[in-house]
Image (cartoon, grey):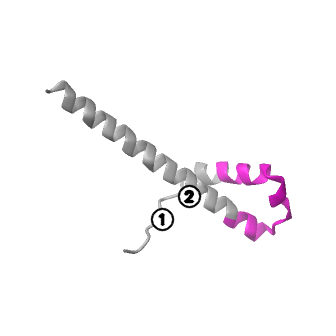
Amino acid sequence: MPFKPLPILERDLARARQIARSWKPLDQLSPADAEIVARAIAEGIAEGRKYGLEIGQACLEACATSDHA
């Protein structure tokens, strides 16, 4: 099964760049390498958002089911 990356929002990338800049050891990376790190962080942010939405959806479904019982 091929891996389908999640969509990265511009705000994810902006926050990821901010996080990457705050890590002093990353100051030594080239701009291209720093962008790779920022994109990896942004993918993690996007993944967290996806899981948060899934958890929220499951809670809504559980509440809806328990209300009708």
Q: Is residue 17 left or right of residue 55?
A: right
**What is the quadrant of residue 33 in the picture?**
bottom right
Predominant secondary structure in magenta? helix
Q: What residue type is labelled 2?
A: Glu
On the picture, is 58 further left or further right than 24? left
- Residue highlighted by disc 1: 5
**Residue in the image at 63% along x and 56% along y:** 41
Q: Which residue is drawn at 83% across and 58% down?
A: 25
| Quadrant that contains the C terminus | top left
Between 57 and 7, the residue placed more toward the observer is: 57
Label annotation for residue 43:
2
Along the viewing direction, whichever of 20 and 8 lies nearer the viewer: 20
Report the amino acid beneath label 1: Pro
**Residue 32 falls inside the magenta stretch:** yes
Q: Is mark 2 on a helix, strand or loop?
A: helix
Where 55 falls versus 27 (above or below)? above
Task: Classify mark 2: residues with Cα within 10 Å, few (<14), some (14-19) or many (20+).
Answer: many
Question: Which sits in the foreground, 39 or 61?
Answer: 61
Q: What stretch is highlighted in magenta?
A: 15-36
Circles 2 and 1: CB atoms closer than 8 Å: yes
> Residue 49: x percent and y percent?
48, 47
Is residue 18 within the magenta segment?
yes
Q: Which of 64 and 15 is in front in this view?
A: 64
- When the figure is inspected, residue 40 is found, relative to residue 52, above or below; the finding is below
Quadrant in which the N terminus appears? bottom left
**Which quadrant of the structure image shows residue 55?**
top left
Q: Residue at x 44, y 49 (%)?
A: 50
Residue at position x 19%, y 25% from top?
A: 67
Where residue 46 appears, as percent x and y from the top left, is 52, 52
Considering only order in the chain, which callout, 1 or 2, is on the residue closer to the N terminus? 1
Percent x, y of residue 30 = 81, 69
Residue 52: which numbered mark, if any? none
